[in-house]
Structures are given as structure tokens and as C-alpha cells.
Image (cartoon, helix red, strand yellow):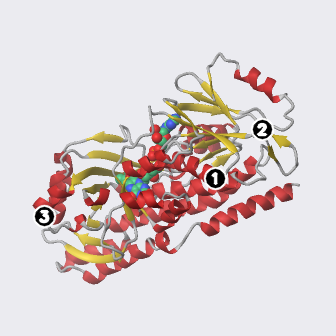
Amino acid sequence: MIHGESSGWYATYKATATLKVERAPSAIYCNDMSIEKKLRVAIIGGGIAGLTFAICLAKNNANVDVDIYESGPEFSTNGAGLGMWPRIWAIMKELGLEEELRRRSTALTGDDRPFMYCKADQAKGHVFAQSMSTMEPYHRAEFLQILCENAPKQLNKNFGKKLDHYVDNPPDPIIMHFRDGTTASCDILVGADGVKSAVRRTMYNHLADKAPDREAAEALRREGSATWTGQVAYRHLISADELRKSCPDHPGLRQPIIFSGENRYLICYPISQGRIVNCAALVSQPQFAGTLYEGPSVSMTSQEELLVLYKNWEPRAQAVLDLMVTPSKWVINSVESLPTFVAGRVAILGDAAHAMTPHQASGAGQAVEDAMVLSMLLAQRELGRKTAPIALQVYDEVRRPFTQSVVRGSLQTGKNYYFQSPLAQEMLRELAKTGAMPTELLNKIGDETAEQLRWTWSTTIKGDQDYAVEMFKTRVAQRG
Ligand SMILES: Cc1cc2nc3c(=O)[nH]c(=O)nc-3n(C[C@H](O)[C@H](O)[C@H](O)COP(=O)(O)OP(=O)(O)OC[C@H]3O[C@@H](n4cnc5c(N)ncnc54)[C@H](O)[C@@H]3O)c2cc1C
């Protein structure tokens, strides 16, 4: 519900709030047996996190009204490739999206889908590992399209609404202030507004205002901003037919392949039923990790800029780079170790909470997991105005440690791909000393990487989901 600035929302709210609700159809019963008006959840941001959260709330029959506020004129289906692991696939199944996703997925090599690793920063490439990959590759636009088509009918969509900040003064409703001068209110605010989240910034400014001293306040204000990882990704979607013309047997036409070199790697895999090859060429400058990147996060750049960075790579890598004629450059910012995802009645999820490097292909997947856990908590019959902060607190306790471990794991995997890890550095030293390819050390890098990715296919989120719900119910019961 949007209010014009002069519409006197507060007076209206106060007036309606004092009305005695006998038995409204939307009323829910709390554990203290009082009758409440249906809670209003506002989602800021209609990307993968926001849309999935709206779908999860509906799927879990959460008895809440939901508004989504997106800064763009519509839900954006921009983007390139996106890999999805079995942990996430299980959630997609639960949401009933399996069939539609399967229709648009890319048949790789049947059940046997090796993820190929190749040392490629020399004239002749050296394939050093093949790991079983169960990653489903998608075009992000197609994935988002499916989410848009499956957004609940009752979802109130508000476009062109860029959040500036919010005010949270309980027991009054939370007031959201948008850049166009309008305001709106809600009972629970969920920030799914990406790496530059205005919800996160506001949350941390509020926390800083309450900090015990100036030093603590400054640290909290800094937490509100994402930092640069020192890495950029040059992205391009190329036509599979074009690649086939120049390199008929290119592995990237069939399966994910990573071409690695020191401080660089190129990944490609087929999407859109094999018609397109998704390519991302990454570059790492570790000395800039933790700084603030001045300039746009995404920009178009020239192929020359990219080619200079990948001079004299092996021919199969070169074939891909030659077709990346108009690459876009993505600055990789991250949010690595927030002390909380929650303050009172406000929570953040997805990139807003834990933007990460793309090396474990898990940013979107972790947003989907956040959405599932938080929606299950908000779907419990014990949920009410008084218990909502408990639900959010449980979400924070369950999801923050896990997602932050993925952020760290992704950084480690990147170190292997960029040949920056201790093992990879040893391999490079050995190569420089002897001139012979250190096969054994390269194999070890492959094994280490496979181990780092094991969680994506060997674990599920089910245990955490059940644990979160159990914890919420116990805490509500203890509260009496
Ligand atoms: C090179 C690269 C490769 C990747 N590969 C993978 C992969 O293979 N697998 C994977 O799982 N992840 C991958 N990711 C990560 C993934 O793209 C992100 O984690 C995911 O898109 C985050 O979704 P989100 O909804 O949290 O944020 P976003 O996608 O950023 O969506 C945020 C939404 O909020 C809106 N918004 C922003 N500010 C406001 C505001 N103030 N008010 C209102 N609305 C606002 C935006 O318009 C946008 O619609 C990759 C990322 C990169 C850079």
C-alpha cells in the first residue's frame, strides 16, 4: 500500500488500528489467543531473492499480505548464465517449478556431466581434472521469466519504487520512504535489494545510532557498504553455432569447462538448450580486495581490454575470447561477514545479506535457500506481531553462519581457479623450476576443488528448515 507524503498515513493507521476487529476474514490467532489483522510483509527488490521469497510465502500458505517494491519499471530479466546445484534444485521441485525448468534446461552429457578443468595460460592446454558436476545451467533471463510467471496472483506489485530508507519505531508500522517522495507502510520488511541494498544500509545506520561508542558506530556504518573483492568478470553470451564453426569439438558446447591461469580464469558452459554458450572471463587483483570500487558496477567494455588480459592462452580458450566481441564488465563486490541479517522487524536476504564471488556458482542459490527458510518461519500459525521478531531472529541464527561459510568457501575455490591457493602456488613454483607440467600437484588442486564443492550435491537444506521451525516454536512457547 503506497501513501502520498501528504496523505496522512499515520492518522489513517491510528484511526483504523483502534477499530475493534471482531472476526475479519484475514484475522489470525496468535499463541496468546488475541486476534490480529493480517500481517503485511513488504519485499524490497524483485530479483531472484525477492521473487522466490514471494513464491515461497504463497507455497507455504503464509497468512500474510505481500507487497513487492521494485526500483525498475518491471521485473528485470537481464543477465547471463546461472548454474543451479542439487540443493537448490530440490527447492525448485518443492515449489512445483521442476517441469518448467526442465523444459528450458540444457541437456549436457546425460547423467555423466563432467566439469572440466584445464591449465590454459600457455600454448598447449593441460586438462587436469574432471569432476562430476550436477549443476543445471540456465540463462538467468529464462530463470527469472519462470519466477515472474509463477509469482502469486495475490502479490501486490509496485514498480518504479526505489527505497531510500525506512523508519522502524515499534509498535507503529514500519514506514518505507521511496526516492519518488512517496511512503508506504508494513509490519515486516524484507530487503532483497541486492548487493547495494538500501535496507542493509538503513539497518546498519540504525544499529550504529544505538552503538555504545563512536568506534563501534563507525564499524557498523562500514558494514552497511559492500566492498570490492579486487575481481571483475567480463561476461558474454556467444552463439553455439559460431563457436562450432571455429572450434567444432569445443568442450564448452557440451559441458562446463574452466580454463585457468595465474590471477585469471575463463568459464564457459552451454545454456538455452545448447543454443548459447555462457562465458565469463575473470580477473583478480588481490591487492584491491576490501577496497571500495569507484565507478559503475556493470559497464560495457571493449574486446581489446579483455584480449590483452588473456594473451597467448591455449587455442580453445582463445576461440571463446575471440567471440566475446562486446563484453560487459561486472565488478565483483561482496558482503562477507555481517554481524546480523536482522534488526527488529526487518530482515535482509540474498545478495543484500551475503553477496559473494561467483566461484561456487552459489549466490542465487543461497538467496533461494534464504527465501525458503524465512518463508517457512513466516508461515507458522504462531506468527503474529509480537512473535515476528522471534521468527526473524531464528532466520538470522540459522542462515547467517551457513551463507557466510559459502562466501568463504567460494573465495577459496576462486583461489584454486586463479592459481592463488598455497597448493597452486607450489605448482607454479615447481613449473618455473623444472619446466615440466606438475601433473600431481595439478591433480591435487582438482581434488581440493571437488571437495570444496561437495556440499552443493551431498547435502540438503531440509535439516536446517526443520531445525528453524522447531527453534521458533520452542522460543514462542518459552515466551508464554
Ligand atoms: C559473473 C557472475 C556469475 C554468477 N553465477 C552464478 C551462478 O552460476 N549461480 C548462482 O547461484 N549465482 C551466480 N551469481 C550470483 C547471482 O547472480 C546473485 O547472487 C543473484 O542474482 C542475487 O539475487 P538478488 O535477488 O539477491 O539480487 P539482485 O539480482 O541484485 O536483485 C535485486 C533487485 O532489487 C532491485 N533493487 C535494488 N535496489 C533497490 C531499491 N533501493 N529499492 C527497490 N528495489 C531495488 C533491483 O532492481 C533488482 O531487481 C553470479 C554472479 C556473477 C556476477
Q: Determine whether the residue tagged by mark 2 lies in a helix, strand or loop.
A: loop
User: Which residue reaches farthest top?
Assistant: 6
Q: Determine whether the residue tagged by mark 3 lies in a helix, strand or loop.
A: loop
Confirm whether residue 373 shows in the render.
Answer: yes
Q: Which mark is residue 134?
A: none
Q: Please, is residue 226 above or below residue 280 in the view?
A: above
Q: Residue 37 carries which label?
A: 2
Given residues 32 and 149, the one toward you in this image is 149
Residue mark closest to the camera, 1 vs 2:
2
The CA distance from mark 1 to mark 3 is 47 Å
User: Label 1 belongs to which residue?
Assistant: 375
Kindly identify the amino acid type of the residue bearing the numbered disc 3.
Cys
* Earlier residue among tags 1 and 2: 2
- How far across and how far down the image is residue 327, in percent? 24, 46
Given residues 183 and 67, the one toward you in this image is 67
User: Which residue reaches farthest bottom?
Assistant: 440
* Earlier residue among tags 1 and 3: 3
The CA distance from mark 1 to mark 2 is 19 Å
* Earlier residue among tags 3 and 2: 2
Callout 2: 10 Å neighbours few (<14), some, many (20+)? some
Q: Which mark is residue 247?
A: 3
